[in-house]
Amino acid sequence: MAYGGAAIGAPPMNPSSASVPKQVKLDKESELRIEAANDSPLRLRLVTGSAEIFGTELPPEIWLSFPPRLKFAVFTWYGATIEMDGSTETDYIADETPMVSYVNVHAVLEGRRNRAKASSSTDSDASQGPRVIVVGPTDSGKSTLSRMLLSWAAKQGWKPTFVDLDIGQGSITIPGCIAATPIEMPIDPVEGIPLEMPLVYFYGHTTPSNNIDLYKVLVKELAQILERQFAGNIEARAAGMVINTMGWIEGVGYELLLHAIETFKANVVLVLGQEKLYSMLREVHRSNPNVDVVKLQKSGGVVSRNAKFRQRARSYRMREYFYGITNDLSPHANIANFSDLFIYRVGGGPQAPRSALPIGADPVASPVRITPVNIDKDLLHVVLAVSYAKTSEEIISSNVAGFIHVTDVDIQRRKITYLAPSAGNLPSKFLIMGTLAWQET
């Protein structure tokens, strides 16, 4: 497994400017909470004992390189000595964590997976492993708990499916998407979720309020695809899934949570850090013995993030897609004629002419109408999704191959310049536009 490009026995980053390595001794069931400095990377290694980051064990005596601004925690079950080289914004030891309750949840899920595997029928309820959905308010640690449960399961030899419905953050790919991918190994503490086989649907916005109906449609599309995959794969069915959700839990946000629980047929609901939400969900599912609602404490290491921080984090995620976390990727600038690209927006346009509506009713916009987009200067800095659709009518029901970033629009020459992760022709000429934009800094 790669660890942020770190090599065994890697030398100090810059001997003339490197700080003196700092050793930290951790007692059993404690954790070192770290926020890397904003302007320099941080190196860390396990000297003695055993420790993990978000459920993934650290290799002994190997320096790992963490990029600036990364927030993480090194937890040990039995005690460990950690060595750090570089500066941090903050680092401190916490001896009160909810890790015991988290690993107890993992143990229960492990039992369900084993029982599901023992069942021979792919159609029976008995052969279905746990479908876990993690819910809670913003900054309650949903993504972190999801990573732990996935990594612990992968360590036991399972290949659970990770489903990310948090369009504001984007744990699998860029923000503005809902996505799923199998997790075959514990998740790399630096590089994050592997991107070999993601199934991605492009919503195009960072909040569902832009088009709630479209969000529901895409959630249903993703769930149906996974259902078909599970039907033909006993191993994946038994391993189950872990579903990460948004932090919007009131009003329409609560309605979307219920929609996700029903659509993915979740049978375990983990509620982090919100007594009211726990009570509401428990009441809704009180009469359903197939759904267990479990309340969990959020970690004290969870950091509250304001709107400005979130916007900056989304910008970093965009950059990471094209350049890599450690700037180890080389995206390509490409030029295409206007006539070679077909760009569409989902939503907007009258649903029906006024003459066809009841007297006094106004025409409303269709939330899933597919509308062509004229190529003009408004496309500058926009991030477009490259759809696998063969026709425009298939755009909503089709997943996407990847993304491009528009860097120039030449109206006179009718050419568009864009950044792509790799050279060569795009896998499709059908592109989807939302409200996602990004400017390199």
Image: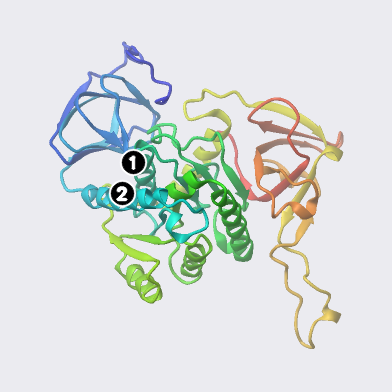
Measured along the vertical axis of the image, is residue 252 above or below residue 94?
A: below
Question: Which of these two is toward me, 344 or 144?
Answer: 144
Q: Residue furthest front?
A: 120
Q: Do callouts 2 and 1 mark residues in contact (Cβ within 8 Å)?
A: yes
Q: Residues within 10 Å of mark 1 (few under 14, many from 20)?
A: many
Q: Quadrant of residue 53?
A: top left
- In percent of width and height, residue 180 lies at 53, 46
Q: Which mark is residue 152?
A: 1
Measured along the vertical axis of the image, is residue 108 above or below residue 42?
A: below
Q: In this view, does 136 lie to the left or right of 105?
A: right
- In percent of width and height, residue 187 lies at 40, 36
Q: Residue furthest left?
A: 27
Callout 2 secondary element: helix
Quarter placement of the C terminus:
top right
Mark 2 vs mark 1: which is more N-terminal? 2
Quarter placement of the N terminus:
top left
Q: Residue 369 carries which label?
A: none
Measured along the vertical axis of the image, is residue 177 above or below residue 77?
A: below
Residue found at x 44% / y 69%: 250
Question: Which of these two is toward me, 402 or 241?
Answer: 241
Return the residue at label 2: 106
Residue found at x 66% / y 31%: 420
Callout 1 secondary element: helix
- In percent of width and height, residue 430 lies at 76, 44
